[in-house]
Image (cartoon, coloured by chain):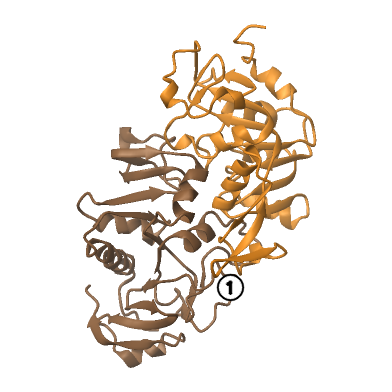
Amino acid sequence: MTIDDKVCTVEAAVAMIQSGDRIMVGSFGNSGYPEELVSALAASDQNELTIISNDLGSPGIGLGRFLTNRQIKALIGNYYNWNPEVAAAKNDGAIKVTLVPQGTFAEAIRAAGVGIPAFYVPAGVGTALAEGKPTAVFDNRTYILERAIQADVALIRAFRADTLGNLVYYKTARNFNPLMAMAARLTIAEVDEIIPAGELDPECIVTPHIFVDKLVLKVKP
Amino acid sequence: MTILVPKAQVKIRIARRIAQEFMAQGRRMFINLGVGTPTLVANYITGNHIFLQAENGMLGVGPKAEGEAVDLKLINAGREPVTETAGCCYFDSATSFGMIRGGHIDATVIGAFEVDETGNLANWIIPNGRQLGVGGAMDLVAGARQVVVALPHTSSNGQPKLVRECTLPITGCHEADLVVTELAVFRFREGQMVLEELAPEIDLEGLRALTPARFTVDDHLKPMSV
């Protein structure tokens, strides 16, 4: 074992994904998603996937390719208006879609990563998205009980890693990535740069390497 | 129907009035602006004591980026490239919504399809089978300390938007605090919708004809600045 044995090729990384897996993908509207991992998975034979992400890119672009390529069984996320193919596929009965308010979605992923199975939030009380969910009153306000969201695999995008897998991010490309890194059995990070352990300022590391299993160096521009 | 305020001026008037609301408080504020008309509010905010938050993970959002300043990994929640301000910072989505849910965001400005007389608002979906998204709307209306609704007084075909009871799926219950249209400003006080300002193009009777929602009139009803 060497300290840099987390580094692997994009092909090797995607080969660890099974059909039927629940996969988290960091993204916010085609920004801050692991482009090479997504491309390789979209080109693979893996299907029946549950994709857990903020949105699903645009038709045929970014995460949208999973739907174009009919690899999706279910979606869990919050905003699919940027990709009208999602509503169409749901209306056809081709996929199942679960909408979760964005803040609840983020917290549910964080919760899964930090060992919290469920939590109460005020968002959505009295709305269609609260139907069937238990409620409770604390300090005279009603809250909804929401469940953590975990995954088999997290595909995340960071800017720079060290060889141990410590990560730092870039501007608003951070989004859900640090949360998803904690919430899956296998976390694969795509990064622009891998530097020797010890060269990242320990005070500035956002995702500690304990959460990162594999590193893929992004090579295409 | 009669056009009371030219279409091009509707959004600008609403955005300017909302910016005044924040500027008048003369204190440090943290504000989240939704897409559309709410985004325009930023154009009328001056000084350096109002900080804009984007729920995709940024505090201190600057003006829209243009030309070489465009960086596709620096966007607001409407996916528009933006710029940084001095002292801006980035964080993950759970921290971002922690700011919102935790009561640290002073106000959110959002658009809406409908607002009703109890302060319920509908802005996330028209159930026509073509939309499938909620985004952060429910978290924002439940979490921000003040919910400011920016909307035209009627739809493009003249249908009222300030109604007795929302007909579309609601985003939150009794969450609206301030409603600003091109014709009027209403504030919810103890669950009651109160008219505070009226635009010069219309009188009270005319406003009631365009407003199915029942409201009371403030003792100090003022002309809306336009």
Provide the chain ID for the residue under circle 1: B
Compared to residue A70, the image places residue A5 above or below, namely: above
Compared to residue B146, the image places residue A21 above or below, namely: above
Q: Does residue A34 appear in this view? A: no
Compared to residue B208, the image places residue A39 above or below, namely: above
- Relative to A60, B201 lies left or right: left
Q: Does residue A119 appear in this view? A: yes
Q: Give the residue drawn at x 65%, y 22%.
A: A213
Q: Give the residue drawn at x 44%, y 65%.
A: B111
Image colour assigned to chain B: brown
Residue B129, horizontal then vertical, whole percent:
66, 62
Near mark 1 (Cα within 10 A), the count class, few <14, some 14-19 or many ≥20, is some
Q: Give the residue drawn at x 49%, y 55%.
A: B101
In this view, the residue in front, B12 or A28, is A28
The three-letter code of the residue at mark 1 reads Leu
Residue A207, horizontal then vertical, whole percent:
53, 28
Residue B28, horizontal then vertical, whole percent:
26, 54
Q: Give the residue drawn at x 45%, y 39%.
A: B91
Q: Quadrant of the N terminus of chain A?
A: top right
Count numbered badges in the picture. Answer: 1
- Relative to B27, A181 lies left or right: right
In this view, the residue in front, B19 or B90, is B90
Q: In the displayed image of the protein, which residue is found farthest to the top?
A: A2
Image colour assigned to chain A: orange
- Relative to B106, A4 lies left or right: right
Q: Give the labeled residue for mark 1.
A: B168
Q: In the displayed image of the protein, which residue is found farthest to the front?
A: A139
Residue B160, horizontal then vertical, whole percent:
46, 80
